[in-house]
Image (cartoon, helix red, strand yellow):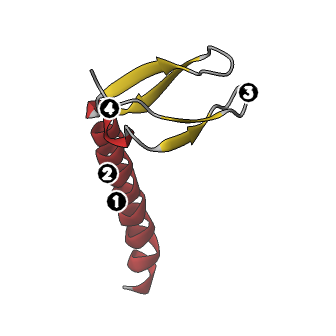
Amino acid sequence: MTTLMFVVLPVLAVIFGIACFAIIRRRSAQAEFLHFRCPGCKQRLRYQAGKAGRSMICPQCYHRSKLPMAG
């Protein structure tokens, strides 16, 4: 019985981890993304529509700006 637990529990943990990863990945793939250009360096940036209105820092030039609303 104890040997069976050492085999079955890790396998179940791996299966559970893969399932969680797949669910999270699918949810993020369904999210709507918007694009805008950084006012500092004109780099085209992508962000989730739900984050519109929040402040962000450009990864290229580190300029702080507010994410525009959709439309």
Dot in front, 3 or 2: 3
Q: How many marks?
A: 4
Query: What residue is disc 2 on?
Result: 19
The mark found on residue 41 in the picture is none
Question: Which residue is disc 4 drawn over?
Answer: 29
Residue type, numbered disc 1: Phe
Q: Quadrant of the C terminus?
A: top left
Q: Nearest to the eye among marks 3 and 1: give it.
A: 3
Q: Which residue lies most toward the bottom here? A: 2
Distance from Cα at disc 3 to Cα at disc 1: 40 Å
Q: Residues within 10 Å of mark 4 (few under 14, many from 20)?
A: few
Q: Which residue is mark 1?
A: 16
> Mark 4 and mark 1: span between their CA atoms?
20 Å
Question: Tag 4: residue type?
Answer: Ala
What residue does disc 3 label? 61
Q: CA distance from mark 4 to mark 2?
A: 15 Å
